Amino acid sequence: MQDIVAELQWRGLVHQMTDPALGAKLLKEPTTVYCGFDPTADSLHIGNLLGLVNLVRFQRAGHKAIAIAGGGTGFIGDPGGKTEERALQTKEQLEKNCASIQAQISRIFNFANAGDVKLINNADWLCSLSMIEFLRDVGKHFTVNAMMEKESVRARLEDRAHGISFTEFSYMLLQAYDYLYLYEKYNCRVQVGGSDQYGNITAGSDLIRRVLAKRLGGEEAAAEKQAWGLTWPLITRSDGKKFGKTEAGAIWLSAERTSPYEFYQYWINTPDSDTGMFLRYFTDFKKEEIEALEAQTKAEPQKRAAQKSLAKAVTTLVHGPDECRSAENATAALFSTAKGASLTELDEKTLLDLVKEAPSGALPAARLAGEGAPLIELMAESGLWPSKGEARRAIQGGGASLNNNKVTDVGAKAASKDLLHGKYLVLRKGKKDYYLFRVE
């Protein structure tokens, strides 16, 4: 057994605990811990990733992990952090979303070599729960006064323009019942989550305590079998940008929504001021390793050693080592003209991800037949260079590349043999300006 709470504390990942002695109590015996994931989309995002990483940490410390897909609570929606009522999802959409995120969770635990995680959908018990049974066995343990003091409810009550429906008001009771159900069926005694979930977590641990007190004949007897909660702080970036957001939108764990290349780029572009925090939060690097990377980055910021280590670790965790290598190769191709950084090494999907923001145009295949088309003509046609004269001077000055290979001959031609994946030519001006020819 390892002191998981001590590890989370040095990583900056303990915001609140229901019991200050939780670390010592978890050292006594293996304990089951759970974290819930809201199926509002068919993919988790990197805000959810911290919950998965921490479940992995609990498991490596000798405990058992349960990940809950909220297929039942998803019918209602957590009011926390929302200023207005969520749009209700259909049963079919929730089932699809839950299946997708359960597959993602399983894959991440596999890539982390963390052993198995028990994956459960709370629709399995919530959707068969009768209203009378729920009010009698759960509702009677809560006062409306106490519920109104919870931050997720209080904030909505203060917003008179939107308020809160009875449906969302009842959400914390459903999550509390989840904890009771897992406690009784799997002896789950720890619930973890972001600090915005503390009210829901304490509602669950309080419900367990009250049910046990009634069953065992008093609070003292219940205290021996209590359940606990732990939260970590919500992540904020030092540059003021919202964590997990880019101009293109959220950073998803799904390769279909956010490609492995885009995912890698998000982490490689982390500001120096945030890299140490993210290494503590999202990797299994030891304290000494992280401090060494921070020192190296401070001394040689241009090498971005910490960002490279962060991007590699997190991309490998989410997408696996093969996709991470492809993203690293694409990044090398994007920022380097060195030997070995040719675009010929990239798979088609990664290539298109790399140049997706670049202008593009069609090129008839016939122009590349035989000896091919003069490269100077294609350069001028791309618009990256305003004329053939400018294109010629760019080649003479070493500022033009074809497929990321520097062009040195003003008489060079582009032929069919130069096509990437049999249908693309990529021109590059300087370090970052690209143009994509799609050959038809």
Image (cartoon, rainbow, N blue to C red):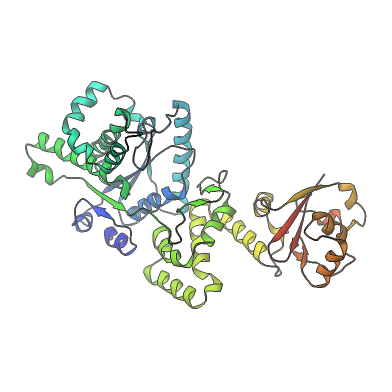
Name the side, left or right, on which 241 lies relative to 340: left
Residue 283 placement: quadrant? bottom left
Q: Residue at x 75, y 50 (%)?
A: 360
Quarter of the image with the C terminus is top right
| Residue occupying the far bottom of the picture | 299
| Residue occupying the far front of the picture | 161
Q: Residue at x 11, y 34 (%)?
A: 215
Name the side, left or right, on which 374 lies relative to 289: right
Q: How many marks?
A: 0
Give the answer, above or below, for where 201 lies relative to 393: above
Give residue 183's position: percent from left, percent from top.
24, 39
Q: Residue at x 10, y 34 (%)?
A: 214
Give the answer, above or below, for where 110 lies relative to 163: below
In terms of depth relative to the viewer, which is nearer, 248 or 125? Answer: 248
Give residue 224's position: percent from left, percent from top.
13, 47
In terms of depth relative to the viewer, which is nearer, 231 or 59? Answer: 231
Name the side, left or right, on which 335 lies relative to 86: right
Give the answer, above or below, for where 48 lies relative to 279: above
Q: Residue at x 18, y 36 (%)?
A: 145
